[in-house]
Image: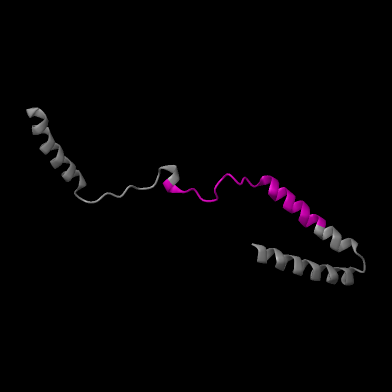
Amino acid sequence: MNSAGQLGGFVCSVAFDYGVRRFGSYDAPILLIALMVMLSAFLFWRIDPTRPLVEDPLLSGTAPVFRKPGLSEQSKARKSVLQPSEAAT
């Protein structure tokens, strides 16, 4: 992100010089920069940093739950083993 900002600053300064030479005044390049700043302010106002870009299924509780095959048979076997001992006490 820092490199992109540095590159943007370099490109903007070079483009500003070309704009001044092309149009013969500072008005057009400054107007272009003012429009970019206003667009940035609008986007900054509209973006919600607390909302994720992509919904994480693990956090939302919609992720599929993978279970080992035969797990329910093992739990049934444990219950059947525990039930007689519980009845004896």
Q: Is residue 64 left or right of 35 when viewed as pictured?
A: left
Instruction: Name the residue: 73% across, 53% down.
Output: 40
**In this picture, residue 54 sits left or right of residue 85:** right
What stretch of residues is rendered in magenta?
34-58
> Is 48 on the left or on the right of 39, as rendered?
left
Q: Position of residue 7 (x, y in %)?
A: 71, 68
Q: Identify the image quadrant of residue 19.
A: bottom right
56 magenta-colored: yes
The x and y percentages for residue 59 are 44, 45
Residue in front for this viewpoint, 46 or 13: 13
Q: Spot the residue most to the front.
A: 89
Image spot of residue 67 (x, y percent):
27, 49
- In the displayed structure image, the side of residue 75 where residue 84 appears, left or right: left
Which residue is located at x 75 percent, y 65 percent? 9
Label total for image:
0
Residue 12 highlighted magenta (yes or no): no
- Image quadrant in which the N terminus is located: bottom right
